C-alpha cells in the first residue's frame, strides 16, 4: 500500500449487525485518490438504477483521502457518498471538523455502511475495535444532545461523532449528517440515508498516525504550504469575515440570490455581512483540523426573541438561504434558524430554498394560509422558523416541503419555478451573475452545486494560472465551457484529497504534497488528469442512473432577467454553453461518455 493510506476499509452490515475489514482497493485509490472519487468508483459497482436510496441496498460510504489527518493545511475533511434520495443520482457531501482525521487515526481510510438495522443503533469505533450499540434511547435526541450523550455513555469526551437529528430519523430528503458540534455534510440527503439504516451516530477515537512515503519531505512541504496559505489574501478574507465576507462583495456582482431568485438588490445584505457579525454577535473564530484559515464563526445572541447560547454561527450560504432569499435582514433570526437546522439535522441551503419557494407560492396566491397553517410574509422570519420545525417532523405543510423544491414544484404544477437542477436546490450564487455558475450548476455531478466547481470565484478574480485558469468576462459565453470544465476537474481533485476549497497552496505544492505522501510520480499534469477522470467517473455513474442531456437544465425561473442589481438584465445562452461544454469534455451530444472513454476509466 502506498504512503498516505491505511489500506483498510471498515465494512459494516447493519442488517446482520456485523462488520469486517476489507483491504482498500489500491487500483481505485491510485486512480481516483480518495473522498468522492474513490467512493464513486466503489459505488459504481455497488449501486444500480433499481437501488432504493432509502432501502437497505443503498450504501453510505464515509471516505477520507491521502492528505486527511496529515500536516497538510486544511485537510480535515471526510466525505459521505451515497445514492441521493433527494435527486436519485450521485450523492456526495463533505464536512470539516475533526471526524475525518479521527477515522484515520482509528485505522480506516473509509467506513462503508450497508443494510438496515432492525433497531436504532450507533457505531463506536475505538482504535480498530468496533461495536454496534443500541440507540433506541438516543432516538429523537437533537444533534447537540446526542453527541454529548454518546460521549458520556462511552466515557470518551474526546471522541468525534457524526450523527443525525430528527430530520434524518424521519427520512426528510434534505436531512444532513452533523459532526463535531455543528459541521454538516448536508447536501443531497445523507442524513436521510443514515436514518433509513436506523443508524443514529458513529463515534470514533483513534491514536494512530498516517504512514507517509517521505515524512520529513512531506512535513517540510506541508509547512511551506501552511505559510503560503496564511499569507494568501483570499484566505485572510475568510479568516477575518468568515464565508460571509462574500456578502458585500457578492451583492455588488449581483451574486447574492434575493427574494427567491427574483431580485438582484436588497438593502438588508449589509445587516447580514461578515463585518456586521464581527461587530455584533461574534465571540471568536474556529478552525477545522489543521486549518490555518479558521473561517468558522462562534457566536452568541445574548438577548431577545432569538437568544442563543455560544454556538457555531451561520455561513454565507445560510445567511442567504434563510436570510436574503426570504428578504429577512435580522442576523439574530437567521442565526437562530441556522441553529435550529443544525440541531434538527437539516441542509440549510435546500431547506431555505424550499421555504423561499413556499413564500413565493404564498405571495402569488398558489397556496393559502389555510394550506400552510399561517401566513408567509417576505421579510418575516417567523413563518420560516415554524416551517423548519414542521419539515423536520414531516407534519402539516412541512410534509410537502420535506420532499424538496422539485417535488413542491411538481405538486403545484409549476416545475419551471422550482429552483433546482436534477432535484438539488440551487445554492447561493446567482447563475445570472456569473454565466460560468449557470453551466456549472447544469452539469455538476450532484445537481445544482457550488462545491464541485466554483466559476464565480474564478471570474471574480481567483486565478490558478499554473493550470490555465484565469478570470474572464463573467457575462461572456466564449471560452466559458473550457474554464468551467477545468475548475470542475480541479474541485473534483480537491474533494478527493480531501482539501478544503478555501485553501489554495497552489498546484505545484499540492503535487509535492501528494508525491511525498504517496511516493507516486505526480506533477501538475497528473493532478489535472486525476481531476478529469474523477469528474467523468461521476458523470458515468449518473448516466448509469439515467441522466441525459435534458437533465442538464436550469429552470425558467433562473433564466429570466433580474430587474435590478449587479446582474440586471443578464441571461446566459445555455444551449451554446452546453454544446461547447460537451465538446470540451468530449462527451456525446447526449451528454454521455463515449465507449472508449468508459474503457479507459475501467468502467466497460
Ligand atoms: S477554511 Fe474553514 S471550512 Fe475550510 S478547513 Fe478551514 S475552518 Fe474548515
Image: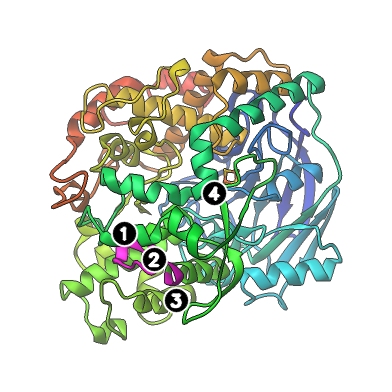
Measured Cα–Cα span from mark 4 to mark 1: 20 Å
Secondary structure at badge 3 equals: loop
Q: Which residue is mark 4?
A: 82
- Residue 403 higher or lower than 97, as above or below: below
Q: Which residue is mark 3?
A: 394
Q: Is residue 498 left or right of residue 426?
A: right
* Residue indicated by mark 2: 403
Residue 406, numbered circle: 1
Is 348 located above or below residue 463 in the figure? Answer: below
Quadrant position of the N terminus in the picture? top right
Q: Residue at x 48, y 36 (%)?
A: 234
Q: Say if residue 39 shows up in the picture.
A: no
* In-front residue for pair 590/205: 205
Q: Is mark 2 within 8 Å of ligand 1?
A: no
Q: Are marks 3 and 4 in contact (CB under 8 Å)?
A: no
Instruction: Please state the extent of the stretch shown in magenta in the rendering.
Output: 321-333
Between the C-alphas of marks 3 and 4, the distance is: 22 Å
| Cβ–Cβ under 8 Å for marks 2 and 1 | yes
Q: Judge whether residue 273 is colored magenta.
A: no
Q: Which class describes the residues within 10 Å of circle 2: few (<14), some (14-19), or many (20+)?
A: many
| Residue at the image point whose x is 79% and y is 66% from the top | 151
Q: Position of residue 11 (x, y in %)?
A: 73, 47
Amino acid at each position: 500500500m502506498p504512503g498516505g493510506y491505511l489500506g483498510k476499509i471498515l465494512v459494516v452490515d447493519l442488517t446482520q449487525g456485523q462488520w469486517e475489514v476489507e483491504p482498500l482497493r489500491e487500483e481505485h485509490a491510485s486512480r481516483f485518490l480518495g473522498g468522492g472519487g474513490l467512493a464513486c468508483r466503489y459505488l459504481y459497482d455497488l449501486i444500480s438504477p433499481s437501488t432504493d436510496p432509502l432501502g437497505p441496498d443503498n450504501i453510505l460510504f464515509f471516505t477520507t483521502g491521502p492528505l486527511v489527518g496529515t500536516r497538510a493545511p486544511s485537510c480535515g475533511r471526510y466525505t459521505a457518498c451515497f445514492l441521493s434520495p433527494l435527486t436519485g443520482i450521485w450523492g456526495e457531501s463533505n464536512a470539516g471538523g475533526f471526524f475525518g482525521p479521527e477515522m484515520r487515526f482509528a485505522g480506516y481510510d473509509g467506513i462503508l455502511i450497508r443494510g438496515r438495522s432492525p433497531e436504532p443503533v450507533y457505531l463506536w469505533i475505538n482504535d480498530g475495535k468496533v461495536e454496534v450499540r443500541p440507540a433506541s434511547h438516543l432516538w429523537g435526541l437533537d444533534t447537540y444532545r446526542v453527541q454529548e450523550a454518546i460521549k458520556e455513555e462511552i466515557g470518551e469526551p474526546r471522541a468525534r461523532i457524526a450523527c443525525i437529528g430528527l430530520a434524518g430519523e424521519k427520512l426528510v430528503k434534505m436531512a444532513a449528517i452533523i459532526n463535531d458540534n455543528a459541521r454538516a455534510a448536508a447536501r443531497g440527503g445523507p442524513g436521510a440515508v443514515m436514518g433509513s439504516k436506523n443508524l443514529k451516530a458513529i463515534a470514533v477515537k483513534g491514536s494512530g498516525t498516517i504512514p507517509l512515503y517521505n515524512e520529513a519531505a512531506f512535513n517540510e512541504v506541508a509547512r511551506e504550504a501552511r505559510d503560503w496559505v496564511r499569507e494568501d489574501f483570499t484566505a485572510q478574507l475568510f479568516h477575518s469575515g468568515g464565508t460571509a465576507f462574500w456578502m458585500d462583495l457578492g451583492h455588488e456582482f449581483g451574486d447574492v440570490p434575493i427574494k427567491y431568485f427574483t431580485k438582484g438588490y436588497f438593502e438588508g445584505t449589509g445587516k447580514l455581512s461578515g463585518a456586521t457579525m464581527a461587530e455584533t454577535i461574534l465571540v471568536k473564530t474556529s478552525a477545522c483540523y489543521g486549518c490555518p484559515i479558521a473561517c468558522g464563526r462562534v457566536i452568541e445572541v445574548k438577548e431577545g426573541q432569538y437568544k442563543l447560547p455560544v454556538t457555531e454561527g451561520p455561513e454565507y450560504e445560510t445567511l442567504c438561504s434563510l436570510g436574503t432569499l426570504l428578504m429577512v435582514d435580522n442576523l439574530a433570526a437567521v442565526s437562530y434558524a441556522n441553529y435550529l437546522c443544525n440541531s434538527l439535522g437539516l441542509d440549510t441551503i435546500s431547506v431555505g430554498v424550499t421555504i423561499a419557494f413556499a413564500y413565493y407560492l404564498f405571495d402569488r396566491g398558489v397556496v393559502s394560509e389555510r394550506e400552510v397553517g399561517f401566513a408567509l410574509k417576505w421579510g418575516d422570519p417567523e413563518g420560516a422558523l415554524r416551517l423548519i420545525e414542521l419539515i423536520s417532523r414531516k407534519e402539516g405543510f412541512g410534509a410537502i416541503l420535506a420532499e424538496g423544491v422539485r417535488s413542491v414544484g411538481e405538486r403545484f404544477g409549476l416545475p419551471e419555478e422550482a429552483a433546482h437542477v436534477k432535484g438539488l436546490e440551487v445554492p447561493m450564487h446567482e447563475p445570472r451573475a456569473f454565466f460560468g455558475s449557470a453551466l456549472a450548476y447544469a452539469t455538476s455531478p450532484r445537481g445544482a452545486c457550488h462545491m464541485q466547481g466554483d466559476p464565480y470565484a474564478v471570474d471574480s478574480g481567483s486565478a490558478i494560472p499554473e493550470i490555465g485558469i484565469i478570470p474572464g468576462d463573467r457575462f461572456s459565453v466564449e471560452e466559458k465551457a473550457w474554464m468551467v470544465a477545468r475548475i470542475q476537474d480541479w474541485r473534483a481533485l480537491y474533494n478527493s484529497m480531501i482539501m478544503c476549497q478555501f485553501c489554495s497552496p497552489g498546484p505545484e505544492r499540492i503535487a509535492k504534497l501528494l508525491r511525498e505522501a504517496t511516493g507516486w510520480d505526480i506533477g501538475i499534469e497528473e493532478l489535472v488528469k486525476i481531476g478529469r477522470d474523477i469528474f467523468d467517473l461521476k458523470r458515468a455513474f449518473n448516466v448509469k442512473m439515467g441522466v441525459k442531456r435534458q437533465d442538464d437544465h436550469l429552470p425558467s425561473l433562473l433564466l429570466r432577467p433580474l430587474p435590478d442589481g449587479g446582474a440586471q438584465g443578464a441571461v446566459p445562452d445555455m444551449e451554446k454553453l452546453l454544446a461547447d461544454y460537451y465538446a470540451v469534455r468530449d462527451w456525446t451530444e447526449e451528454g454521455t461518455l463515449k465507449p472508449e472513454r468508459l474503457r479507459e476509466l475501467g468502467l466497460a
